[in-house]
Image: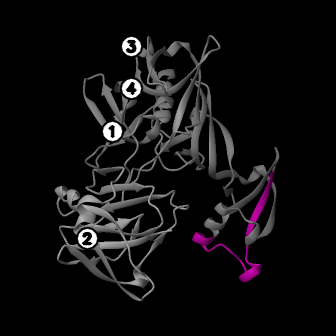
């Protein structure tokens, strides 16, 4: 049983999906409670601490002494409660008197403040939207799950599980039944359910080759050893000896050094938020579509005469980007008709009066060939979206020019 629990916890730690800053996984308890967050501490074979930012808790009514309701004005609510109330149409009243009913639950052991009662009767179910920590035993957990990565997610880590039979399976960890099964979503979208007793070892694989492991891992590991020392890094491999004996793990530090740790020397596992985490996401476009800083801008047709390129544009369609709010970064994302088309895309500076409603803007062929602005980088994702990034653009009017299609998208940098 201890081996199963150890396997379970290690898979939990390495199965954390890249969802947002604190909601990394969901634990469903046998009493029906649901916790969103991440495991912040675990003692093998003993207990764990789950740090949550949101929790749906179920308790028996005989443990509740009283419930005190409060009408909280919308202006006094946290942004989390405001978002929940909006999406669930939970407000009472209108205008300045609009409020949300939150409650204090008085139990035999203390009080639970400012929660939303969702059900009463034999059981009381309430929603908690503030950070909290729960100490849990293994036998209280029914299932652990994480959200499947969307098609636009470009960061993250896959797991490669090797069975004692020699079979290997790779995919995103998505669900676990403690001590019984682990489920992964393979690249073909099919879920493979594995028996934890048949797993020999696992390793991890980053899905974005252009990012480091630390940039794709939302949390990192802190391993406390029985000699009162600790090791920090990310667990990249776990090997199990026969019947749980002689097992060990490999952990990679920030400097890329790898250390091997015997399973029997581990006293406690901890997880902490990783400040280097830098998730990347994609945008799905139809062929020929172009976005600039994720905004859809209307292109104009370019006509050429005597090495002079001109186009007419409605000033109302001219969008501005503030250098301060965009960190002085202009990112063009395009679904190209042909991947070789990227060589025909140019960023040019325009010089003209933009005070009229309809603008005729001009730029010369030499501007395109010899004076175009060079991007920092250009990369095409697995979804065939090409991202071209420019930094340091000075205030002025610019145009992103597709010389093959003879179209230009003008915009202003302020």
For marks 3 and 2, give the CA distance.
73 Å
Residue linked to disc 1:
209
Question: Which element is circle 1 on?
Answer: loop
Disc nearer the start of the sequence (1/4) = 4
| Element type where label 3 sits in the image | helix
Front disc: 2 or 4: 2
User: What whole-number distance in Å separates the C-alpha atoms at marks 1 and 2?
Assistant: 39 Å
Q: Nearer the viewer, mark 1 or mark 3?
A: 1
Q: Nearer the viewer, residue 136 or 232?
A: 232
Task: Specify few, some or many for label 3: CA neighbours under 10 Å numbering under 14, 14-19, or 20 or more.
Answer: few
- How far across and down, in percent of the image, does residue 106 sit? 82, 53
Based on the displayed image, in which of its 4 quarters is residue 298 positioned?
bottom left
Going 53% across and 33% down the picture, which residue do you hit?
220
Could you tell whether 375 is left or right of 267 in the image?
A: left
Q: Residue 333, percent across and down?
A: 33, 61
User: Quick check: 373 left or right of 110?
Assistant: left
Q: CA distance from mark 2 to mark 4?
A: 69 Å
* C-beta proximity under 8 Å, tags 1 and 3: no
Q: Residue 364, which numbered label?
A: 2
Query: The magenta stretch spans which residues?
Result: 86-106
> Which residue is disc 4 drawn over?
197
> Which sits in the foreground, 414 or 252?
414
Q: Which element carries disc 4, helix, strand or loop?
A: helix
Point 70% across, 51% down: residue:
60
């Amino acid at each position: 049983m201890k081996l199963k629990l150890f396997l379970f916890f290690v898979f939990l730690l390495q199965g954390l999906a890249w969802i947002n800053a604190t909601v990394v996984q969901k634990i469903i308890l046998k009493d029906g409670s649901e916790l969103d967050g991440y495991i912040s501490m675990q003692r093998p074979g003993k207990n764990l601490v789950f740090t949550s930012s949101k929790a749906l808790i179920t308790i028996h009514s005989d443990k509740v002494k009283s419930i005190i309701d409060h009408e909280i004005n919308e202006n006094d609510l946290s942004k989390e409660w405001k978002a929940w109330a909006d999406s669930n149409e939970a407000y009472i009243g209108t205008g300045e008197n609009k409020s949300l009913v939150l409650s204090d639950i008085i139990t035999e052991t203390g009080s639970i403040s400012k929660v939303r009662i969702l059900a009463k009767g034999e059981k009381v179910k309430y929603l908690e939207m503030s950070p909290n920590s729960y100490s849990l035993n293994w036998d209280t957990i029914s299932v652990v799950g994480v959200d499947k990565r969307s098609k636009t997610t470009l960061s993250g880590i896959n797991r490669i599980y090797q069975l004692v039979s020699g079979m290997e399976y790779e995919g995103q960890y998505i669900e676990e039944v403690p001590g019984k099964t682990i489920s992964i979503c393979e690249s073909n979208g099919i879920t493979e359910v594995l028996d934890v007793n048949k797993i020999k070892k696992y390793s991890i694989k980053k899905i974005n080759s252009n990012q480091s492991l630390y940039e794709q891992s939302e949390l990192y590991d802190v391993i406390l050893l029985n000699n009162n020392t600790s090791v920090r890094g990310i667990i990249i491999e776990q090997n199990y000896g026969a019947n749980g004996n002689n097992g060990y793990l490999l952990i990679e530090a920030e400097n890329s050094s790898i250390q091997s740790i015997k399973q029997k020397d581990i006293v406690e596992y901890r997880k902490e938020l990783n400040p280097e985490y830098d998730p990347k996401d994609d945008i799905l476009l139809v062929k020929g579509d172009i976005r600039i800083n994720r905004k859809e801008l209307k292109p104009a047709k370019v006509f050429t005469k005597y090495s002079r390129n001109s186009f007419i544009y409605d000033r109302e369609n001219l969008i501005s980007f503030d250098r301060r709010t965009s960190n002085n970064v202009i990112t063009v994302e395009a679904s190209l008709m042909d991947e070789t088309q990227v060589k025909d895309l140019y960023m040019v500076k325009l010089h003209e009066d933009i005070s009229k409603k309809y603008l005729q803007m001009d730029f010369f062929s030499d501007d395109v060939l010899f004076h175009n602005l060079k991007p920092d980088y250009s990369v095409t994702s697995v979804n065939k979206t090409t991202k071209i990034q420019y930094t340091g653009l000075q205030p002025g009017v610019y145009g992103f020019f597709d010389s093959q299609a003879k179209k230009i998208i003008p915009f202003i940098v302020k």
